[in-house]
Image: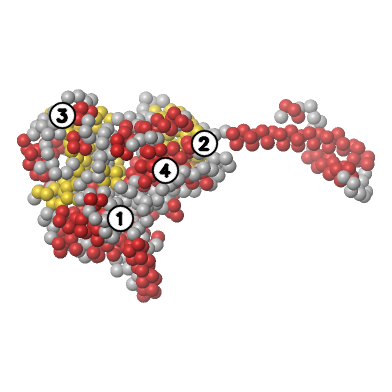
């Protein structure tokens, strides 16, 4: 505005008079007839008119310059949480030209190690066949699936009575329409469960056809426990106790009586009604998820797009001004604090515990976003991870295994993985000269186990659980071990929790949410029961939402592709359509569903 310093100052009325006179002069110059024009007033107003015109031109140039600067400036976006949801959001935002800062309380992409220097991971995660977005992103940066993942493997279920069942690799059987293909492929795999008990699952298949009929029906199923649905659908007690309960304890991390029936069916759908091969699972061939999969993606984003990664940093609160997030306050583990200002957008890719921590320091955010406050009030599931190094190699029928009905579990779900069978680099597993098998054991819903000492946990595994499943463990000795506890670490899909879960879009236009528990609304994706793929998809969709709604600027509207999972098979689509038509006919009589009201 220095250009305007020498201009004569005028009152608003004088400016208005000059503007009128100038418009009249413009009309006369253009040949229009001007009647009643006071030439003396015009002459007197000319200096003021010139001043006003110069002022307008300067303002116009200033606005144009600011507009050009705004368009050329990269939008400044913070992503909070570096799991799959945060990683997906960071990738899509970076590729859309944004200046992205990724915050996480841990060290994203860094491997974990035991006190003796051996590798460790919090939970062994499987990768199902229908992970199209994850597979695409890994291939995009030049990673080869054959180098990352094992072949699809079988899994075994063990009880105190011995081997109960093995889950096959369905791709190895002739592919038949669902669920016929699954039934025939697994027919001979149950060692003790009678056929009559297995057939009792039929009623649950009908409920799976019904529960996605509409939003109202889904919410009704969500309010019901899976246990109650199993009773109403006529499932036998033995089918539930021997197979479904242990499956849910390690798949959704809670027993049927503490799980939403709707979310339970989202998971079991992939076993029973999706494509025959949808439940096939594989594992990491080397390292951990963080260092083998996430770290290469993060490094790619840092090198190509200057992604800023702030690890060991906790977000303490968000500042809200004029219904937008404007700033982010954070603290580093060393104690120093900071403020990230002038934010254009924020993505919260957090679980319930992390969201609670942010809301505690964000009273204005809590006030204007009641859905986030409700989500922060939800609770997580306790997890314990153990790794054992043995002095000899122990052969097992399958590398991936589930514990079922052991009293020593104290209500937890338990798994054990033979890492020496899954990962060929034995020296990496031992961080030196290999001696024998390396076993990763994970416990979910582990609240009753967390208070036990490390020695008691190792004794439970070595003397009770592992030798009951595979007797050869009784002859081996543990030469090294490590135990870690993670209270409230994973999402708990409790009955009635659906309406409290966060939504992709929030009341603040420049704030979006990501994570496996986030509701996507009309952007819902088919990977509902597959938490890693679903979390990644929600991150992509959060970034896409910000690109669509204009908060990043007109130039920054690029949306990342989201690959759908395979469509339902024709017979499942027809079954759902027929069920919906029948339900609509029966609704006036209060008979739209035999399971829910």
Q: CA distance from mark 2 to mark 1?
A: 38 Å
Kindly identify the residue that appears in the image at 28 percent across and 60 percent down: 177
Q: CA distance from mark 4 to mark 1?
A: 26 Å
Say whether residue 556 is left or right of residue 349.
right
Q: CA distance from mark 4 to mark 3?
A: 38 Å
Q: Please tell me whether mark 1 sits on a helix, a strand or a loop.
A: loop
- The residue nearer to you, when weighing 329 against 584, is 584
Q: Quadrant of the N terminus?
A: top right
Sequence-earlier tag: 3 or 2: 2
Q: Position of residue 483 (x, y in %)?
A: 20, 34
Mark 3 nearby-residue class (10 Å; few <14, some 14–19, many ≥20): some
Mark seen at residue 97:
2
Q: CA distance from mark 3 to mark 2?
A: 48 Å
Sequence-earlier tag: 1 or 3: 1
Sequence-earlier tag: 4 or 1: 1
Q: Are marks 4 and 1 in contact (CB under 8 Å)?
A: no
Say whether residue 575 is left or right of residue 338.
left
Mark seen at residue 395:
none
Which of labels 2 and 4 is toward the front?
A: 2
Q: Position of residue 139 (x, y in %)?
A: 38, 38
């Amino acid at each position: 505005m220095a250009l305007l310093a020498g201009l004569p100052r005028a009152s608003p009325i004088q400016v208005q008079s000059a503007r009128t006179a100038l418009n009249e002069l413009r009309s006369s110059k253009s040949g229009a007839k001007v009647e009643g024009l006071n030439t003396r007033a015009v002459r007197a107003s000319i200096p003021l008119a010139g001043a006003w015109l110069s002022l307008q031109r300067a303002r116009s140039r200033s606005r144009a310059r600011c507009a050009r600067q705004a368009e050329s400036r990269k939008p400044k976006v913070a992503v909070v949480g570096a799991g799959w949801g945060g990683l997906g959001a960071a990738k899509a935002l970076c590729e859309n030209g944004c200046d992205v800062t990724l915050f996480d309380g841990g060290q994203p992409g860094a491997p974990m190690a035991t006190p003796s220097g051996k590798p460790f991971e919090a939970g062994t995660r499987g990768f199902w066949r229908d992970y199209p977005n994850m597979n695409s992103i890994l291939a995009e940066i030049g990673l080869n699936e054959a180098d990352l993942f094992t072949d699809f493997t079988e899994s075994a279920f063990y009880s105190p009575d011995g081997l109960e069942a093995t889950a096959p690799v369905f791709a190895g059987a002739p592919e038949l329409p669902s669920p016929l293909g699954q039934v025939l492929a697994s027919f001979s795999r149950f060692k003790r469960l009678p056929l009559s008990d297995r057939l009792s699952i039929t009623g649950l298949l009908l409920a799976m056809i019904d529960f996605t009929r509409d939003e109202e029906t889904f919410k009704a199923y969500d309010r019901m426990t899976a246990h109650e649905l199993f009773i109403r659908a006529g499932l036998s007690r033995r089918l539930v106790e021997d197979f479904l309960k242990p499956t849910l304890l390690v798949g959704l991390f809670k027993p049927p009586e503490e799980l939403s029936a709707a979310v339970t069916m989202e998971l079991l759908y992939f076993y029973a009604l999706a494509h025959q091969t949808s439940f096939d699972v594989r594992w990491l061939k080397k390292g951990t998820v963080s260092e083998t999969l996430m770290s290469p993606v993060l490094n790619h984003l840092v090198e190509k797009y200057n992604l800023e990664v702030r690890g060991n940093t906790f977000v303490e609160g968000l500042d809200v001004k004029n219904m937008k997030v404007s700033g982010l306050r954070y603290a580093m583990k060393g104690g120093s604090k900071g403020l990230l200002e002038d934010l254009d957008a924020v993505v919260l890719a957090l679980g319930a515990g992390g969201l609670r921590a942010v809301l505690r320091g964000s009273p204005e955010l809590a006030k204007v976003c009641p859905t986030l406050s409700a989500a922060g009030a939800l609770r997580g599931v306790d997890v314990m991870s153990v790794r054992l190094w043995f002095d000899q190699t122990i052969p097992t029928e399958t590398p991936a295994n589930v514990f079922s009905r052991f009293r020593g579990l104290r209500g937890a779900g338990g798994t054990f993985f033979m890492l020496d069978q899954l990962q060929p680099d034995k020296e990496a597993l031992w961080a030196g000269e290999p001696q024998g098998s390396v076993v990763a054991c994970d416990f979910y819903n582990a609240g009753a186990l967390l208070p036990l000492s490390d020695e008691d946990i190792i004794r439970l595994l070595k003397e009770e659980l592992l030798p009951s499943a595979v007797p050869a463990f009784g002859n081996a000795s543990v030469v090294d071990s490590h135990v870690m506890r993670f209270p409230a670490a994973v999402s708990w899909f409790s009955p009635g929790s659906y309406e409290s879960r966060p939504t992709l879009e929030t009341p603040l236009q420049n704030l979006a949410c990501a994570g496996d528990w986030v509701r996507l609304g009309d952007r819902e994706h088919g990977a509902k029961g597959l938490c890693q793929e679903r979390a990644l998809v929600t991150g992509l969709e959060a970034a896409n939402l910000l690109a669509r709604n204009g908060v990043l600027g007109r130039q920054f509207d690029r949306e990342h592709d989201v690959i759908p999972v395979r469509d339902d098979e024709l017979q499942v689509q027809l079954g759902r359509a027929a069920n919906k038509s029948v339900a609509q006919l029966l609704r006036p009589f209060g008979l739209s569903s035999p399971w829910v009201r």
